Image (cartoon, helix red, strand yellow):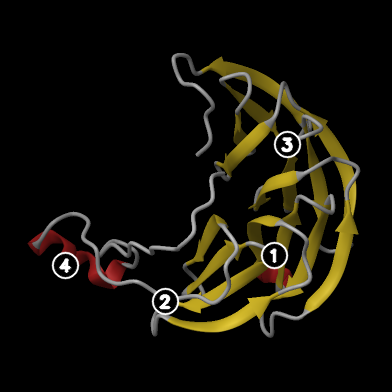
Amino acid sequence: MSASSSLFLFLSFLIFPFAETRAQKGNLYSFEKKIALPGDGGYDYLLLDQASHRLYVSHGTTVHVIDVDSDSLIGTITGMEGNHGIAVVPKVKKGFISDGKSNSVLVFDINDFSTLKTIPLSGKKPDAIIYDKFSDRVFAFNGSSNNASVIDPVTLTEIATIGLEGAPEFAVADGMGKIYNNIEDKNIMDVIDVKSMKVTRSYPLSPCGGPTG
């Protein structure tokens, strides 16, 4: 994903249900404020954990954690060479960050943000990373090896890889056994079945050029 020199957090009135009434009275989305973060590195993925009211921001070689109730910085996760995505697994109280430059995933404690482990991957340049509740697995999408690494959030190991049809970008899980993943260099979307751990369908996205989100 593309980086920028500064972060603008556009907070809509739809982020949490208690703000829905305010949204109905005005514009659907409106600019509210900016939250300043330290450091000069570029930005990549954001993850909003609505259960904990925390926003995780990938920033160069760090991930910042923001409390969205107070709009304050409450934690910084360091020790990476070039991070991209963030996934959290509340049931094991762990978070996972893809580190593209070191071909690994950093595991952190979601309570105190301390580093627990670095998981080496067989894939190259992990980018997007998600947690799929249906399979209870973490999936890291490797942009330079055309595959996805499957991680067990309990044993904290890579347990499988899934071959893809090109260089993957952002992915989402539907919670019912399917993951949809953009293949940026082929302008297609792969559909992964998490039971078989295989791509079962691909959809052309033409005239899209380089699908990302």
Element under disc 2: loop
Disc 4 vs disc 3: which is toward the camera? 3
Q: Is 119 placed above or below 17 here?
A: above
**Residue on which disc 1 sits:** 61
**Residue on which disc 2 sits:** 68
Q: Earlier in the sequence, mark 4 or mark 2?
A: 4
Give the number of the disc on residue 143: 3
Q: Looking at the rendering, which quadrant does residue 197 occupy?
A: top right
Q: Is residue 30 left or right of residue 157?
A: left
Q: Marks 1 and 4: in contact by CB < 8 Å?
A: no
Q: Earlier in the sequence, mark 4 or mark 3?
A: 4
Q: Quadrant of the N terminus?
A: top right
- For the residues marked 4 and 3, what is the alpha-carbon distance in whole angstroms? 41 Å
Task: Name the residue at 54% across, 51% down.
Answer: 3
Q: Marks 2 and 1: in contact by CB < 8 Å?
A: no
- For the residues marked 1 and 2, what is the alpha-carbon distance in whole angstroms? 22 Å
Element under disc 1: loop
Q: Residue 111's x, y, as percent? A: 66, 83
**Residue on which disc 4 sits:** 21
Q: Earlier in the sequence, mark 4 or mark 1?
A: 4
Task: Name the residue at 21% across, 60% down.
Answer: 30
Disc 3 vs disc 2: which is toward the camera? 3
Q: Residue 178's x, y, as percent? A: 62, 35
Q: Amino acid at mark 4?
A: Thr
As rendered, which of 187 and 39 lies closer to the eye? Answer: 39
